[in-house]
Amino acid sequence: MDLEQIKKEFGLRVKAYRKQNKLTQEAFSELIELEQPSLSNLENGKVYPTFTTVCNLIGKAGIEPNSLFEFLYNKSEKRKIIDKQTIDLLKHVDDEIIDLLKHIQPKMKEHIKEIIKTIAK
């Protein structure tokens, strides 16, 4: 993994944590004592985090160090890690689908189930 990929992956992890905790960039940047534009650049993989920022992410935001850096050591599991982040970020989509299914007639639910099975394969 090259340094550009590391920058991007680190930023994705910070962004995922912030979104999971339903924090705006403004609120999160205040918490970790980083200017909001700098947080945006970090989350978008445009800059490397400083040592102070890493310490604040761990100490002030309470992010587990392993969750920030696990991708460096677990290359064979990288796809699973990214999938978990994506699932966490898009969890609201699952909830929305479940709510919509509540209003569908049982016969249609069976058809939808078969369609989903086909897509999932």
Image (cartoon, rainbow, N blue to C red):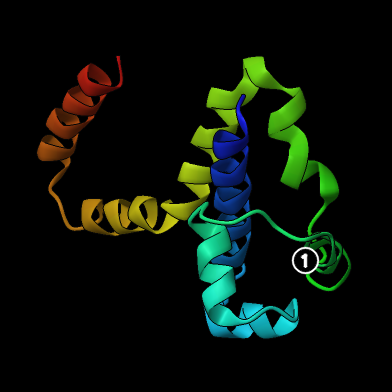
- Look at 58% across and 53% down and name the residue there: 11
- For the residue pair 101 and 50, the one nearer the viewer reads as 50
Residue at x 72%, y 29% (from the top left corner) = 72
Does 69 sit above or below residue 35?
above
Q: Quadrant of residue 15?
A: bottom right
Q: Residue beneath label 1, please?
A: 53
Q: Is residue 22 visible?
A: no
Q: Is residue 98 left or right of residue 70?
A: left
Mark 1 element type: helix
* Residue 101, x across and y down, in percent: 23, 51
Seen at 63% across and 47% down, the residue is 10
- Label 1 CA crowd tier, 10 Å (few <14, some 14–19, many 20+): some
Q: Is residue 14 visible?
A: yes
Q: Is residue 36 above or below residue 61?
A: below
Location of residue 66 in the rendering, given as x and y in whole percent from the top left corner: 82, 42
Residue 69 placement: quadrant: top right
Q: Quadrant of the C terminus?
A: top left
Q: Position of residue 37 (x, y in %)?
A: 52, 77
Q: Is residue 85 left or right of residue 96?
A: right
Of 38 and 103, the residue lying toward us: 38
User: Residue at horizontal 58%, vertical 60%?
Assistant: 42
